[in-house]
Amino acid sequence: MSTITVPLPDEDLAFLRAWSEKQGTSAEEFLARQARNLREHMQRPLHPDVVAATGIFPADLDVKKEYREYIEKKYL
C-alpha cells in the first residue's frame, strides 16, 4: 500500500475527521474508499442510452450562437 500527503485547509481536515468519525471510519479510510469508487466508476462502460445519444450534435456546432439566436427569436 502506498502513502501520499495531501495538504488541506485546517477547517476542511477538521470537518473530514469529524464526519468520518460519525460514520465509524477514519478520514484516511474514507478518502481511500472514495478513490477506489472513482476508479471503479471510471472503468464501467457508459450506459447504452448515453452511447446512443453521443454524436447527436455536430462537433462544429456553435452552441453559444445557436442559443443566442433561440433567445432572440423567443423574446423579440
Image: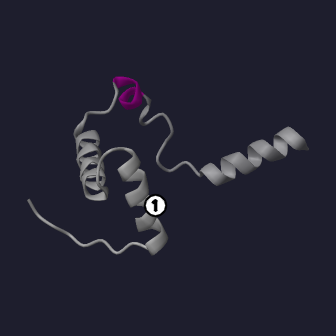
Residue range highlighted in magenta: 48-52
Instruction: Determine whether the residue tagged by mark 1 lies in a helix, strand or loop.
Output: helix
Point out residue 42 in the picture as x, y percentages from the top left corner: 27, 43
> Dot 1 corresponds to which residue?
15
Residue at 40 percent across and 66 percent down: it is 13
Residue projecting furthest to the top: 49
Vertically, is 19 above or below 53?
below
Residue nearest the viewer, comparing 72 with 9: 9
Q: Nearer the viewer, residue 18 or 8?
A: 18
Q: How many marks?
A: 1
Quadrant of res 47: top left
Horizontal relation, residue 40 to residue 67: left or right: left
Q: Which residue is situated farthest in the left direction here? A: 1
On screen, residue 30 above or below 73: below
Residue 72 in percent (x, y) is at: 83, 47
Q: Nearer the viewer, residue 11 or 75?
A: 11
Residue 68 shown left or right of residue 59 in the figure: right
Say left or right for 45 vs 69: left
Q: Where does the image place residue 25, in percent across and percent down from the top left?
A: 29, 48
* Type of amino acid at the residue the image marks with label 1: Phe
Residue most extreme to the right: 76
User: Overall secondary structure of the magenta stretch?
Assistant: helix
